[in-house]
Image: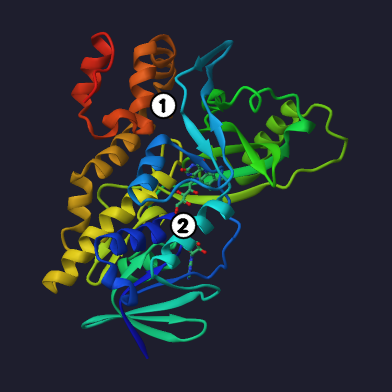
Amino acid sequence: MECFDVIIIGSGPAGTATALNLLRADPTLACNILLLDKAVHPREKICAGGLIPHTLDCLNALEIPLTVPHVQVNRARVRALPGREVVCDEGGMCSIIRRNEFDFLLVRAAAERGAEIRQGEKVIRLVRESDGIRVMTEKTTYRARIVVGADGSGSRVRRQLIGQTRQPVGKAIMADVPVSETDWDGFAQQRYDFNFLPVQDGLRGYLWAFPCLIEQVAHVNLGIYSLGVRSFSNAALQDRLTTEIDTFSPARAAGQTRRLRAFPIYGYALERPLAAPHVALVGDAAGAEPLLGEGISFALEYGAFAAQAIREALRTKDFSFDSYTRTLAQAWLGKKLARLSFATKLFYGRTARLWFTLAARNTRLQSVGLKWYNGVDGWHQRSGWDAVRAVINRYPRQP
Ligand SMILES: Cc1cc2nc3c(=O)[nH]c(=O)nc-3n(C[C@H](O)[C@H](O)[C@H](O)COP(=O)(O)OP(=O)(O)OC[C@H]3O[C@@H](n4cnc5c(N)ncnc54)[C@H](O)[C@@H]3O)c2cc1C
């Protein structure tokens, strides 16, 4: 039976970031890290592909230039109140990639730096033993001192080794439409659109329109995000998205259908354990941010965080990971996730209209909020009081 120090299950952004951060800190680990994925890259991943600016900082730290095709977004149009739209024009808001290309870029970088990657190998069973984990795939069985669950929102690692706890699960549905079949001006204007108007009808989420390039052809990625499973059924979400697609492409031939693709989102929750002896979770397996469902930058950050914990475990031979959940919660990463969880109560709760009105009226609030969310100028690591002071005073000072 093959044995590894670290087996990372899942080679999306969280899994590859864990491997890349481990290898950056200690290249001699290369022969002791195995990445397993059930898919074969470049694989399809249902995702709008928006990279907030902080994601590019994470890539820079890993010395991975963004060499895949991407669309730069410099403005945002937000509709949250009837008859009113807000356009934010801060520049450099987002880079939109396609996940098949982006994830393949990360996987290639990990392979070039020495990580062993086995694809098309689904993990089916995990068993904890006294000194590690037995990992059974469709093809063979491995042993690992540490298993990293980077296997996405439905994480088998989480279910089999940590225990599934009840969590609000969100869902996102999307479709790609060639811009030439729409009358949307967002692609030309380097803009993305957010539509929170359905919050008034009880949706805890929003509709989006992102510009993107698919095989060099301009497309709009249209989607709907819903936090929680009760308020809107699948069919209702699909109907709402189809109506939205129709407003973007009114000349759509009668009977022409769009391919809608859905994927669940598992939200971060402070109280839920993210580790157990010999196991740590990262990325969507640990929990995505529940307000907008953005998860790529968090996946990369989880990877950096887990790599540190793994190195410490290998150094001390303490594989309990008993401080992993707490330390993550106390780090800026956990604090940002917790604040975004709290924000869902404001923006998707009974007082939503008040918060959307405040946000729509106050340009300083918009500016600070955007910088904080996008991780610009170190804002994501600053305290809530700093943000309040910056909104009350003139303009955000540099940290
Ligand atoms: C419709 C939609 C739109 C989104 N838009 C955005 C966006 O614009 N920006 C953003 O930042 N985030 C977005 N997200 C969230 C983002 O896609 C995730 O947060 C991100 O993919 C998390 O990365 P990950 O590495 O944790 O998991 P994943 O990317 O899901 O990777 C998990 C990997 O594990 C593998 N795997 C799973 N099970 C097994 C198994 N049993 N054995 C072996 N391998 C396994 C899978 O094949 C996969 O490669 C969106 C999500 C959805 C659903």
Q: Residue at x 43, y 36 (%)?
A: 52
The residue labelled by disc 1 is: 347
Q: Depth check: 192 or 134 in front?
A: 192
Where is 104 relative to 36, above or below? Answer: above
| Amino acid type for the residue under numbered disc 1 | Phe
Q: On the image, which quarter does residue 163 sit in? A: bottom left
In the rendering, which numbered label is found on residue 313?
A: none
Whether tag 2 and tag 1 are in contact, CB under 8 A, the answer is no
Crowding at dot 1, Cα within 10 Å, few <14 / some 14-19 / many 20+, comes out as some
Q: Residue at x 58, y 32 (%)?
A: 208
- In the rendered image, residue 102, in percent from the top left (x then y), is placed at 52, 51
Give the mark nearer the N terminus: 2 vs 1. 2
In this image, 115 relative to 218: left or right? left
The residue labelled by disc 2 is: 106
| Amino acid type for the residue under numbered disc 2 | Leu
Is residue 393 something one can see in this rendering? yes
Q: Residue at x 52, y 16 (%)?
A: 87
Residue found farthest to the right: 254
State the separation of the CA atoms marked 2 and 1: 34 Å
Q: Residue at x 46, y 28 (%)?
A: 92
